[in-house]
């Protein structure tokens, strides 16, 4: 009788308190204003951002013992993913003090390294909220998305990124053991099918967890978190790229094995990991972007991205992703490609992507995963806005700002992506030499084509 009662009680507890929320720090989302535009006018609304759950303190539901410390799980609290999710709670965040995240009006600043009382934080990732418990969902077809960015304080090896991923509006709240939801930044996924996500579909990714050998805060579990990704902006002061990454899956999808596309299985992934990128330097205009460039990264500028559909409707086939810049009151058209084998182009189209893959000798996983059309399906279903600052423990961000692969001839088309040295961007170096780096995003706007700048 006693044991039966105990079993019932435990079952109840695991349902009621699983992946609970801690209350040791109150969660208060930093406010950020956002503009909706139609021709002639923009309307501001007071929104906010939330910190991704991976950065948060994860401790016992009943106390303050760590469930995850450094880059390892506590094996008694987390013998398996389900039990772990029921034993552990995500807590609120001290945004400026612990994470170096501040907002003012329409501006968000993310600082690279923040020394707090208990820990040193490196990088961050935040999501735009519609209200306190829902991510804002963007439908970008036949729309224009615009923001200002200051990359002047982002050296080689860093990435101040602004992009969209197909997360769920509630962050998976109510899925399996997830009681925290979007308010606590759960449910991340992207086209790299990352394995470093601590909870996927409400279950801890603690099984098969291997602590990183070069990242004191990260590791990788058996599960990966895949979903379509539209990179509007991956950049530092030296190089910038915008890149659609379609996936064959709809919404956040846990992967195992070859579906994740790890290592040699890269092109077996359900997602197009390479994407179809437009990096002005890589596409042959070496003076367009950088300090003193046509787009001068020494000061703030505006980035405009237009999602063009075949019939100019919000449900038409996505056929083109256009880019332009505004700086010092002047509209700057995107750079024009100057690469043998690629017709002159200043935007991403199917023809551009196909020609680029051929000219650079890259595998065309982009069209294999459905290309612009499938990317457009995700844009139409709706995506969440992500802003982050990060360094790259895998390949030192050299794919963005240097010669990559590092042993290839930089004269070979597609190899040179920026002027950073091939030995730059090592996390241990950038964290030591540029802890005060930061990115500022501001004046985020969504509107009809031509309405936001
Ligand atoms: C879509 O809009 C563009 C620009 O205004 C115009 O040139 C084009 O003809 C339109 N296409 C269709 C199918 O209506």
Image (tube, rainbow, N blue to C red):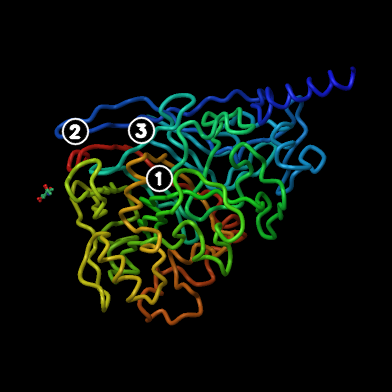
On the image, the x and y values in percent for residue 386 come to 44, 42
Comparing labels 3 and 2, the label whose residue is closer to the camera: 2
Would you name the residue on which mark 2 appears? 38
Q: Is residue 308 left or right of residue 229?
A: left
Q: Dot 2 lies on which element? A: strand
* In the displayed structure image, the side of residue 119 where residue 105 appears, left or right: left
Q: Which residue is mark 1?
A: 164
Residue 439 vs residue 373: left or right? Answer: right
Residues marked 1 and 2 touching at CB (< 8 Å)? no
Q: Secondary structure at mark 3?
A: loop
Quarter of the image where the C terminus is located: top left
Q: Select label 1 or label 3 by which is in front.
A: 1
Label 1, label 3: how many angstroms apart (C-alpha)?
Answer: 19 Å
Q: Which residue is mark 3?
A: 106
Local crowd at mark 3 within 10 Å, few (<14), some, or many (≥20)? many
Spatial separation of the CA atoms under disc 3 and disc 2: 19 Å
Q: Verify CB contact (< 8 Å) between mark 3 and mark 2.
A: no
């Amino acid at each position: 009788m006693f044991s039966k009662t105990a079993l019932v009680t435990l079952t109840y507890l695991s349902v009621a308190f699983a992946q609970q929320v801690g209350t040791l720090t109150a969660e208060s989302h930093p406010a950020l204003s956002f503009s909706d535009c139609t021709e002639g006018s923009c309307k501001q609304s007071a929104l906010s951002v939330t910190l991704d759950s991976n950065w948060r303190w994860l401790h016992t539901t009943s106390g303050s013992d760590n469930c995850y410390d450094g880059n390892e799980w506590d094996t008694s609290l987390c013998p398996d993913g389900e039990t772990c999710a029921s034993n552990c709670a995500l807590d609120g965040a001290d945004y400026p003090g612990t994470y170096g995240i501040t907002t003012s009006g329409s501006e968000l600043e993310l600082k690279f390294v923040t020394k707090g009382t208990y820990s040193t934080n490196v990088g961050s990732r935040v999501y735009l909220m519609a209200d306190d418990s829902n991510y804002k969902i963007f439908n970008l077809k036949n729309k224009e998305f615009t923001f200002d960015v200051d990359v002047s304080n982002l050296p080689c090896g860093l990435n101040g990124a602004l992009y969209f991923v197909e997360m769920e509006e509630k962050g998976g709240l109510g899925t399996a053991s997830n009681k925290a939801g979007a308010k606590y930044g759960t449910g991340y996924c992207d086209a790299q099918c990352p394995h470093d996500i601590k909870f996927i579909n409400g279950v801890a990714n603690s099984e098969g967890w291997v602590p990183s050998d070069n990242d004191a805060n990260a590791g990788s579990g058996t599960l990966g978190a895949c979903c379509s990704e539209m990179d509007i902006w991956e950049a530092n002061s030296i190089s910038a790229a915008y890149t659609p990454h379609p996936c064959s899956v709809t919404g956040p999808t846990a992967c195992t094995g070859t579906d994740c596309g790890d290592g040699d299985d890269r092109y077996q992934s359900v997602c197009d990991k390479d994407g179809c990128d437009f990096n002005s330097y890589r596409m042959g205009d070496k003076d367009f972007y950088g300090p003193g460039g046509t787009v001068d990264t020494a000061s703030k500028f505006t980035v405009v991205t237009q999602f063009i559909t075949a019939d100019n409707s919000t449900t038409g086939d996505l056929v083109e992703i256009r880019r332009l810049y505004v700086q010092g009151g002047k509209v700057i058209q995107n750079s024009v490609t100057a690469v043998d084998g690629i017709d002159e182009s200043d935007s991403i189209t199917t023809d551009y992507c196909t020609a680029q893959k051929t000219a650079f000798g890259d595998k065309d996983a982009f069209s294999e995963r459905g290309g612009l059309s499938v990317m457009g399906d995700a844009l139409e279903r709706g995506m969440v806005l992500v802003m982050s600052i990060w360094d790259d423990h895998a390949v030192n961000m050299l794919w963005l700002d240097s010669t990559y692969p590092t042993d290839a001839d930089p004269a070979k088309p597609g190899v040179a992506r920026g002027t950073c040295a091939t030995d730059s961007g090592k996390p241990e170096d950038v964290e030591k030499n540029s802890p005060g780096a930061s990115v500022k995003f501001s004046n985020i706007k969504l509107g009809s084509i031509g309405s936001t700048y």
